[in-house]
Amino acid sequence: MNRFNQWVAIVTAASHGIGTDYARTMAAAGACVAITDTDETGLAQQIEAEGGSAIAIAVDTSIESEATKMAWTVMEHFGRIDVLINNTAGDTMSAGQFGESPLNWDRHIAQDLQRIFACAKATIPFMRRSQYGCIVNICPRITANSGVLLHQVARSNAIETLSGSLADELEREGIQVETLTSPAELLKLAAGWSRHFSTEAGLSQ
């Protein structure tokens, strides 16, 4: 079933790793997908060759002006934005709990949060026009005694808190904000989106 038939989704950092999995999951379920990253690996062309609909946008989403340009590019190509998937699953630091420099700490935490903020800020105005939409922030599940490092705990907690604040602010405007840990969870969430958005947006379920 094409659960996302006619929907338009932006997937950030989608040219590699788990971002590719999210983009392929959306495309396979019928969505039009904007593949965004700082480089281009041909994923959009692969999705198109497989019968899907996708465009590639080279962008550094930690820069607010580039995130804004990204959103406008998607609007110009597809006409709307239904879903934003903020994939910020950064690399693991290699120097232990206290061995990393402040620069690396900033790169792994502050820049990840900036990417989420910049992309949300860029896309929310278009979702508000439609009075529906969903923002998904990818957040690794952190459990007690899981052996994770400090920066992973800090990043995960920060993403959860930011997502909760956005959800509280945007719910009354028909925009949902979720945190997910895997592409499999995305399809489970889709049924709720369909009930919530399809009537308002005129989208197929």
Image: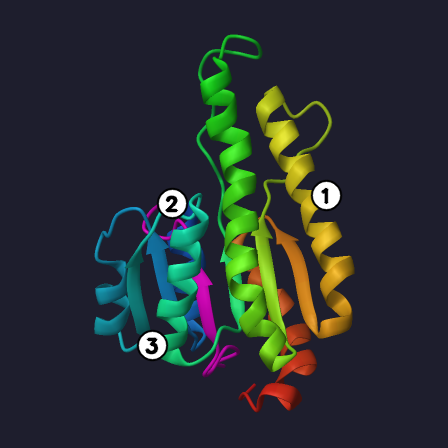
Which residue lies at the image location 49% right of the left edge and 29% below the top edge? 108
Sequence-wise, the earlier of marks 1 and 2 is: 2
Pick the residue in front: 98 or 50.
98
Sequence-wise, the earlier of marks 1 and 3 is: 3
Which residue lies at the image location 47% right of the left edge and 78% below the top edge? 80
Residue 186's quadrant in the figure? bottom right
Q: Are marks 2 and 3 in contact (CB under 8 Å)?
A: no
Q: Tag 2: Cα neighbours inside 10 Å, few (<14), some, or many (≥20)?
A: few
Q: Which residues are magenta?
A: 1-16
Q: Are marks 1 and 2 in contact (CB under 8 Å)?
A: no
Locate residue 47, reporting x and y percent. Answer: 28, 68
Does residue 99 sit above or below 146 in this rendering?
above
Q: Which mark is residue 17?
A: 2
Nearer to us: label 1 or label 3 = 3
**Res. 148 visible in picture:** no
Q: Secondary structure at mark 2?
A: helix
Between the residue at mark 1 and the residue at mark 3, the CA separation in whole angstroms equals 33 Å
